[in-house]
Amino acid sequence: MVYGDLQFFDIILFAAIAGFIIYRLRSVLGKRTGFQKKPTDHQPKYKELKEEEQNQKIPSLLDNQLKLETVYKNVSNFDHKQFLDGAKKAFEIIITAFNNGDKKTLKNLVSQDVYNAFEKAIDENTNNPSAQFYSLIIDSVENAKVENNTISISLNFISEQMLNNDEGKIVDFAALLHYVSAIPEIERIRYTTSHPIEFSQRLINVHKELPKLVKHVHLPVQSGSDRILRRMKRGYTSLEYKSIIRRLRSICPEMSISSDFIVGFPGETKEDFRETMSLIEEVKFDQSFSFSYSSRPGTPAADLDDQVQDKVKQERLALLQSKITNLANHYSRSMVGNIEKILVTGESKKSSELLAGRTENNRVVNFTGEKVLIGSMVNVRIEEVFPNSLGGSYLPSA
């Protein structure tokens, strides 16, 4: 199963990043030392990104330029891209060494107190030699300083790794869906909610491989502006998001996509909002959960400059919701006359005389039927479109 997002040893590492990701780590910053791994043909299984997209990610780490300003002032030839790339390689070497129980490599790379924590974990068999890197990103630059001719930069990493099951096979969310699908009593599978950065090609392929999986995906995007996505620290671009949708619909053209949006995030300009509306038109979202940004004390966003006026946020939210409602209504009207397989969930909220269920694309359908049908899959012909639901007629099995 995929796991990551700040494992316990990530937290340990954060306390020591400034101690090991400095220029003495020349092994990963351009100069070979005795403890650098020799080059091999095997490369880490990072998520595939276009080179230019990777380059776009680097500046997103530097939103607060003040954190690196000291370095630039003191080191004229400092190359932050080379440094950050080297830091990622160093992080992978350390975590791989931990997973493999390689104390010698760890001792050469980390401070004594961090090494002691790693050693204890290895001795207690909490490491996992079967783990394989799936993705690794630098989430943020925490601190940077120049002291005694040494540059120290503290970084936050987010890593995903895959574990092997007892048969030695990689187990991730896609594999889990296969296991669930193999249960005969389960007729329909719907999952929520994925993060775009974790929506792998394996997961996309599952939508072709498993007939039980509904033709609907809820994939939060939050904004169509790359600048705002960087400020939100979402870890992907609008181009990467659209790539996921394109690949999903190449497998299943009728795939329904819903999403989450936040309008009025600090610093959002007219152009940023226009890019969000453009994304909505291009993807043609079917449904959404959309909100105007509200400040939460203690969160990084609360301290950002350029807070958007409430009036502007409400105006933009109304425009966005109107756009998606129009797209949803158009899609609903196209369903009239279709015979849809409905999972009957219970009595209708409209009337206790009606039953309600959901289509594959997650629309509520109200129809007349016996309560014994609750919990079963039935065919319903779609006949009417309402603001938030559909109406239809139950078609008994022959």
Image: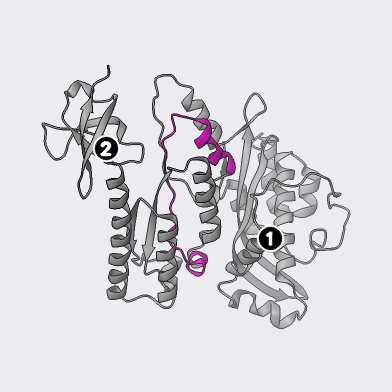
Rendered location of residue 118, percent (x, y): 69, 45
Rendered location of residue 80, percent (x, y): 70, 70
- Asked which secondary structure carries label 1, the reply is helix
Q: Quadrant of the C terminus?
A: top left
Q: Residue at x 70, y 57 (%)?
A: 88
Instruction: In the rendered structure, find residue 51 and report the number of the disc placed on it.
Output: 1
| Horizontal relation, residue 60 to residue 219: left or right | right
| Horizontal relation, residue 392 to residue 87: left or right | left
Crowd tier of the residue under label 2, counting other residues whose Cα lies within 10 Å: few below 14, some 14–19, many 20 or above = few
Q: 102 or 112: nearer the eye?
A: 102
Residue position for label 2: 337
Q: 29 or 343: nearer the eye?
A: 343
- Asked which secondary structure carries label 2, the reply is loop
Q: Per the image, is 332 magenta?
A: no
Q: Is residue 49 above or below residue 126?
A: below
Instruction: In the rendered structure, find residue 110 and report the number of the disc placed on it.
Output: none
Q: Is residue 252 above or below residue 112?
A: above
Q: Quadrant of residue 274?
A: bottom left
Specify the amino acid type for callout 1.
Glu
Query: Residue at the front extreme?
Result: 337
| Horizontal relation, residue 91 to residue 42: left or right | left
Specify the amino acid type for callout 2.
Gly
Rendered location of residue 368, percent (x, y): 15, 30
Q: Residue at x 11, y 37 (%)?
A: 351
